[in-house]
Image: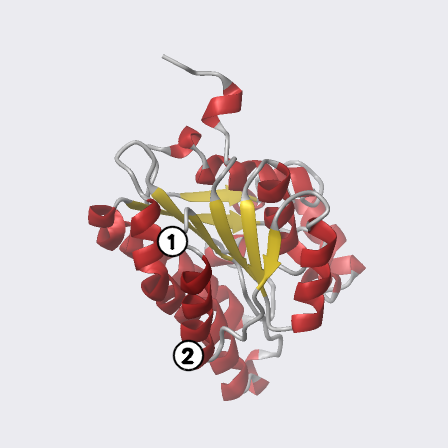
Amino acid sequence: MNLKITDLFSVAGKVVLVTGGSRGLGEIFARAYLQNGAKVYITSRKADACDALAAELSSEGTCISLPADLSRMEEVERLAGELAAREERLDVLVNNAGASWAAPFDDFPEHGWDKVMNINVKSVFFLTQKLKPLLAAAATDEDWARVINVGSIEGLHVSELEAPSYCTSKAAVIHLSRVLAAKLAPARIAVNAIAPGYFLSKMTVGLGDDYLNKVASGSRMNRLGQPHDIAGIALYLASRASSFVTGAVIPVDGGLATTA
């Protein structure tokens, strides 16, 4: 019986795709997998940013840029096809790409609803569907393939955030993860969700210091998230340490949701 941490949490040699991988939490996921021996593909809508990060990370391992706009079905299909042309298997899919739209309830626009739902929910389902053959090819009885969907703590509680489509979409991602866990189990594909709290990123900086300070002071741990907080969960869900876990939702929020 080998219970060494280096074996339990190893992702060495795995092939990983991180959507929304050019910045924010996606960049943290990509760095964590790459620095621990995985071959990492990153995709994002902005090709320049995706290419630049892949070039930077390639000094530490193998990181490949495959830019795509996952809000469009033809781009979902193209990305899946490009990956299939390069790889015979995909060990880990991280559905992290997301968007938000902030506006008061009375003024919230239809296009703000549709944009967020398309990228945050629709693309998660269809990219997983299109990549199922590669995921199934990677799976063994001892080590299933993994799908990790990135929800949000805003999908688990109700806050003052003026972003109804974002919050609703993240709740949908969390339940979709449970549905996919049931549907994909026969193919030996485990599906789990992470519900991050507030981390400093381009998206959260736009909320302003006052809001972020209020969120931080309102959490049990009295701070915002740091890169290592989310990287550890990402490594756990991609490794043998989580081999008996599917359909789970893991909040990484410093206890924020338990205060409401």
User: Residue 175, relative to residue 166: is it above or below?
Assistant: above
| Residue at image location 44% in from the left, 48% down from the top | 92
Q: CA distance from mark 1 to mark 2?
A: 23 Å
With 257 as the anchor, is 215 left or right in this view?
A: right
Q: Residue at x 49, y 77 (%)?
A: 71
Q: Nearer the viewer, mark 1 or mark 2?
A: 1
Place of residue 9 in the rendered image (x, y in percent of width and height, measured from the top left): 50, 29
Q: Can residue 153 be seen at all in this image of the molecule? A: yes
Could you say which disc has been placed on residue 88 in the image?
1
Q: Residue drawn at (47%, 77%), measured in percent from left and top? A: 75
Q: Residue furthest right?
A: 209
Q: Looking at the rendering, which quadrant does residue 128 occupy?
A: bottom left
Q: Secondary structure at mark 2?
A: helix
Q: Is residue 22 above or below residue 59?
A: below
Label 1 close to label 2 by CB (< 8 Å): no
Q: Amino acid at mark 1?
A: Glu
Residue 21, given in percent of the width and then of the height, sits at 60, 58
Q: Is residue 168 visible?
A: no
